[in-house]
Image (tube, rainbow, N blue to C red):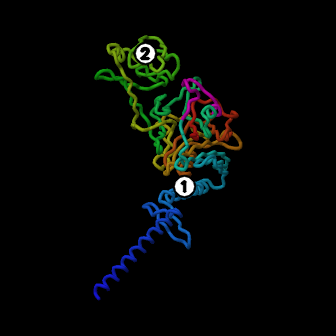
Amino acid sequence: MNIEILKIQLLKMHCFAVKFFIFGCIIVLTCSIFKIQPIIANETIIARGNVVTPILQKETISNDIKRVTADEQSQEFDNSIKKRYPNSLIYTIAPGIKHIKIKKICQGRPVLINVVEINTKLNSNIKINPQLASNNKLTSKSTITNIANRNNSIIAINGTYFKPQTGVPLGTLMINKKLYTGPIYNRVAMGFFDNGYDMARLELNASIKFKNNSIKVDNINQPRMLSTYVLVYTSDWGTNSPATPKYGIQIAVKDDKIVGISTQSMQIPEGGYVIIGPKQKLEILEKYKKITLDIKTIPEWDNVNHIISGGPYLVKNGEIYIDVNEQKLQAIGGKNPRTAIGYTKDNNLIMITVDGREGASVGMTLNELAIYMKSIGCINAMNLDGGGSSVMYVSGKVTNRPKVKGGIALSNALTVNLKS
């Protein structure tokens, strides 16, 4: 009897195993026919009625969040511009770039102001840098429109001071890490870095090095102020060096080797330079086969891309600060057309021009300009060349009212481009 029961139980187990095997085969076949995807680590399946829906992967969610954040930042920028410039005409030139036209009353007189404010965090294609009037030489001038068109710029304002007769910039000018001209009176300059800006009174720290010794270089591609100065003129200056001072000599250098010595003006080697200074300082160089030109600045802006100088300060560390006497700029007082640049605590760049010397706009004093720059959020700001030079170019045309229609010929400009 027990043996019979055991046989029956074994038979039932066998039948169950066969059924389980057949059921498993049916499941595998069904998956194959309907291409049901397995559950994987980056994706979860949710059943909704008869539909099986995958949850979006983390990367997609992250991109959506980034889009929302960018939209929020853009809206925040728009709102801040409206708040900062009430009762003004506001134009969007490109994402992150606003042009604002303002009419103010200063001491009962009208003033016309053009402002460009730039938020580079909203547009990685924005490129800001100074430009020379010519690609080849410092001794040239051109209108803002020609400078902008040559560089495909969408925004441009006049830059630093320059010598009217020749066009040579008077003060520090660096473009794409190349120093074209050195500082005059250590005037204030603005440095442009990958992630922001800085502003400081800038001093040249340059020297001619030979063996274990060196000779201080007082300036680069600038007019001589003292006969005792040692000056360097590169091939950007022009074809020939300036005249030699009394009791002075000139030394031409190319590829770190002396290629000529004279008491007269010399041809500047292409890619090289000419050193001009007192003979008693420079004649020691004749003994050495290799000399090098070492150029630095104080402060030492190691990672700076561009530098443009001006003067005086208008705002320093959030406070109005106008150091006209220290920077030897006493001649630019009174109500005049003005150009200025600065930046906010959020690293927004601000470029402005103020029209003047006309009935519709009387211009601003430096103090009025400083007050205004602070009022629109600048934590650091400085004056640029003004008067007849003040001109702003936006989207293909001059947008302010310079005395000379279209603006006078300039030495250099600060430009804004959109990288393609």
- Marks 2 and 1 sit apart, C-alpha to C-alpha, by 54 Å
Residue at mark 1 = 70
Instruction: Give the vertical position of 209 relative to 155 (above or below).
Output: above
- Tell me the element at label 1: helix
Instruction: Give the vertical position of 288 relative to 64 (above or below).
Output: above
**Residue 136, how many percent across, how many down?**
55, 24
The residue drawn where x is 46% and y is 63% is 38
Which SS type dominates the magenta stretch?
loop
Sort mark 2 into few (<14), some (14-19) or many (20+) by Cα contacts within 10 Å.
Answer: many
In the picture, the disc for residue 252 is 2
* Mark in the foreground, 2 or 1: 1
The span shown in magenta is: 130-146
- Tell me the element at label 2: strand
Front residue of 352/234: it is 234
The quadrant where residue 84 appears: bottom right
**Residue 13, how many percent across, how many down?**
36, 78
Please give left or right for residue 204 compared with residue 143 in the image: left
Look at label 1 and name its amino acid.
Ala
Quarter the C terminus occupies: top right
The residue drawn where x is 45% and y is 25% is 220
